[in-house]
Amino acid sequence: MIRTFVLMVATFCLSFIAQADNHGFDNFIEVELSISDISMSERGMVITYEGMAGKYGLVHATHNMVSTNDANSKGYFTGTVQAIDDTGALQKSMTLGLWSRNGTKLKVYGFDDDSPTRILHISTVDLRAKSFQAKVWELD
């Protein structure tokens, strides 16, 4: 089951790579959020983030982290992202990707299926400092 899900994530990511191929990666948005909650589930760790994120407004996100090795040092995640901009408009999307862990720091590579823009984000999550720092690219 894990292998099937990882294959699905990889296939999903490859479709974005095709779109991202002609994208200028110098044009990104920096986002910094705080970790508001870390909890454990039967499948792994659940991390919830919140904060103001520039043009996106107030953002709340949850990553359901699932490990794919015995050392719990890498895996995949699924989750949701919700943003409320300054006009009060709410946007919600699913997010998924891959992660790796070194000590208390995670490197997260994710995609959001946002409307109207598909989003790529590469993040550093510091569990000890309870911080989330990301570079975000709008692909569409």
Image: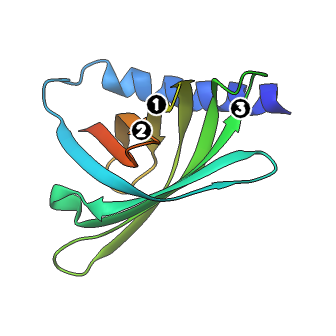
Is residue 39 placed above or below 105 in the rendered structure?
below
Circle 3 — which element?
strand
Amino acid carrying mark 1 in the image: Lys
Mark 1 nearby-residue class (10 Å; few <14, some 14–19, many ≥20) = some
Callout in the foreground (1, 3): 1
* Image spot of residue 86 (x, y percent): 16, 75
The reply to whether callout 2 and callout 1 are in contact (CB within 8 Å) is yes
Tell me, for residue 125, which label it has, or none: 2
Report which quarter residue 118 is drawn in: top left
Q: Nearer the viewer, residue 140 or 72?
A: 72
Residue that carries the numbered disc 1 in the rendered image: 105
- Lower position in the chain sequence, tag 2 or tag 1: 1
The Cα–Cα distance between marks 2 and 1, rounded to whole angstroms, is 6 Å
**One can see residue 140 in this view:** no
Which part of the image, by quadrant, shows the N terminus? top right
Quadrant position of residue 36: bottom left
Q: Residue at x 41, y 21 (%)?
A: 18
Residue receiving disc 3: 67
